[in-house]
Amino acid sequence: MKKYAKRRAKVLDKLDGLTVRVDKKKRTGWLILERPPLNMISYAGRRQINAILEEFGCDDDVGVVIIRGAGGVYTSGGNVAEFPDIERDGMSDLAWNMAAAERCPKPVICAIEKYAMGVGFELAMACDFRLATKETVLALPEISIGMMPGSGGTHRVARVAGLTRAKDMIMLGRRIPAPEALEWGLLTRVVEDSKAMDKAVTAMAAHLNSFSPLALKTVKRVLNSAYETGTQAGLEIEGQGYEKLRDSWDYKEGIKAFLGKRKARYRGH
């Protein structure tokens, strides 16, 4: 356990507008965007988000990751004022950093309140679950400053919501209210307010942590490949994942717990 604490300390050194917490008892890692009033994400912060999620991925104290903004606001997006000073070709890999949530072997929940703009929305789209309050608006407004999304937004929105809706949102720079975003499939769930969000993310994290970590890791990888492979290849990947889990301690424990009508005690292997 000490090696994880040491590695975590190194990654957390001099965070730029970000706060990290680990609740060992609830096996939850929190990544909080914290640059009041609207929690803008800096250029340096993008790389740090990637590093933090990588560390959460190998931290035994963390079973589920939650990303949220401080002060009842998720984020207004990136710090546009920095962009002209970034070196040439220095921003061509932004999508890789924001895809860290997708690569993380553990479930990642994004709790969205008030605004999910630009890179913040792109980060959310890489997460496994997206919860938003009903007054939240989502947008990729880059077209309004002569730019386009550059952190994965174009493909992720088109893949989930369809090309017609992606063009409606991105080419018109339109803000999408949470209820409409839910209808499009961009959100997992819409809750009433911040108080309801507290309960929803806590309950979802606890529910996920009740399952086998190995099964969650495996099925996440299989599901993430769904859009990248043909049906036959995808079914082969699914079958191999199924076979992998058949030999696991967790699967055997799950069967024993089911037959014994008791709660399973998973180990993650």
Image (tube, rainbow, N blue to C red):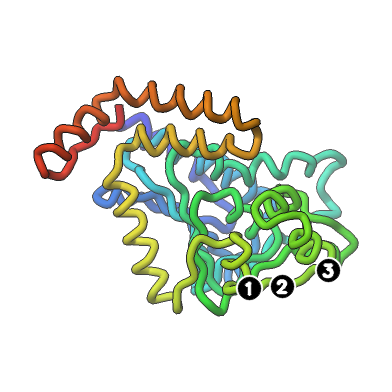
Residue drawn at 30 percent across, 47 percent down: 209
Residue drawn at 83 percent across, 51 percent down: 85
Residue farthest to the front?
232
Q: Amino acid at mark 2?
A: Arg
Q: Amino acid at mark 1?
A: Val
Q: Nearer the viewer, residue 111 or 182?
A: 182
Q: Horizontal placement of 2 versus 102: left or right?
A: left
Q: Amino acid at mark 3?
A: Leu
Q: Horizontal placement of 88 versus 152: left or right?
A: right
Mark 3 in CB contact with mark 2 (< 8 angstroms): no
Q: CA distance from mark 3 to mark 1?
A: 15 Å
Q: CA distance from mark 1 to mark 2?
A: 6 Å
**Mark 1 = which residue?**
137
Mark 1 in CB contact with mark 2 (< 8 angstroms): yes
- The crowd level at tag 3 (other Cα within 10 Å; few <14, some 14-19, many 20+) is some
Find residue 100 and report its horizontal and vertical position in percent. Answer: 57, 41
Report the label total.
3
Identify the mark at residue 172; answer none if there is no mark.
3
Identify the mark at residue 147; answer none if there is no mark.
none
Rendered image quadrant of residue 204: bottom left
**Nearer-N-terminus badge (3/1):** 1
Q: Secondary structure at mark 3?
A: loop
